[in-house]
Image (spheres, rainbow, N blue to C red):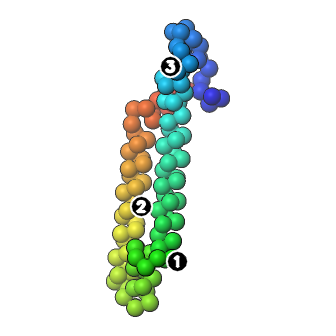
Amino acid sequence: MDGINPTYFHVAANFNFSPFERVTRLVLPAIIPEIVTALRMTVTISWLVVVAAEMIAVRSGLGFLILDSRNALRMDFVMDGMIVIGLVGLALDRLMRGLGELEGARWSRMRH
């Protein structure tokens, strides 16, 4: 709660917010931008780990396609796999960025 402007807590007290209302109408909207940022970073890292794990441990997936195609000297499939990995990563990032544009995620930007 250190990052939330104390004035908002004074306003909540003036309106006699219950503890539940303070959490749902003040604290949660204030932390949503940080949650969205953490989700965006987590999804990015998770996507990288999934592809890397496919290269090491399984017999299917994009990572396996790239390694198997490299071994078979099929550079066209290698490039196709890399493009698909990039496009999926871009789509996931856009989805997470879209979450950041929601009304609740913009709430704390107005606090200064």
Gap between marks 2 and 3 measured at Cα: 37 Å
Horizontal arrangement in the rendering, residue 72 relative to residue 31 (left or right): left
| Secondary structure under the numbered disc 1 in the rendered image | helix
The answer to whether residue 58 is above or below residue 7 is below
Horizontal arrangement in the rendering, residue 2 relative to residue 92 (left or right): right
- Check whether the beta carbons of the residues at disc 3 and disc 1 lie within 8 A of each other: no
Q: Amino acid at mark 1?
A: Ile
Q: Amino acid at mark 3?
A: Glu
Gap between marks 3 and 1 measured at Cα: 49 Å
Asked which quadrant contains residue 78, the reply is bottom left
- The residue positioned 52% from the left and 53% from the top of the image is 42
Q: Which residue is label 1 attached to? A: 56
- Mark found first going from the N terminus, 3 or 1: 3
Residue 21 % position (x, y)? 50, 19
| Secondary structure under the numbered disc 2 in the rendered image | helix
Residue reaching furthest front?
A: 58
Q: Which residue is label 3 attached to? A: 21
Residue 90 % position (x, y)? 39, 59
Q: Amino acid at mark 2?
A: Gly
- Counting labels gives 3
Within-10-Å neighbours for mark 3: few <14, some 14–19, many 20+: few
- Mark found first going from the N terminus, 2 or 1: 1
| Secondary structure under the numbered disc 3 in the rendered image | helix
Q: Which residue is label 2 attached to? A: 89
- The residue positioned 48% from the left and 66% from the top of the image is 50
Residue reaching furthest right?
A: 2
Task: Identify the mark at residue 44; answer none if there is no mark.
Answer: none
**Is residue 26 shown to the viewer in this render?**
no
The answer to whether residue 98 is above or below residue 76 is above
- Mark found first going from the N terminus, 2 or 3: 3
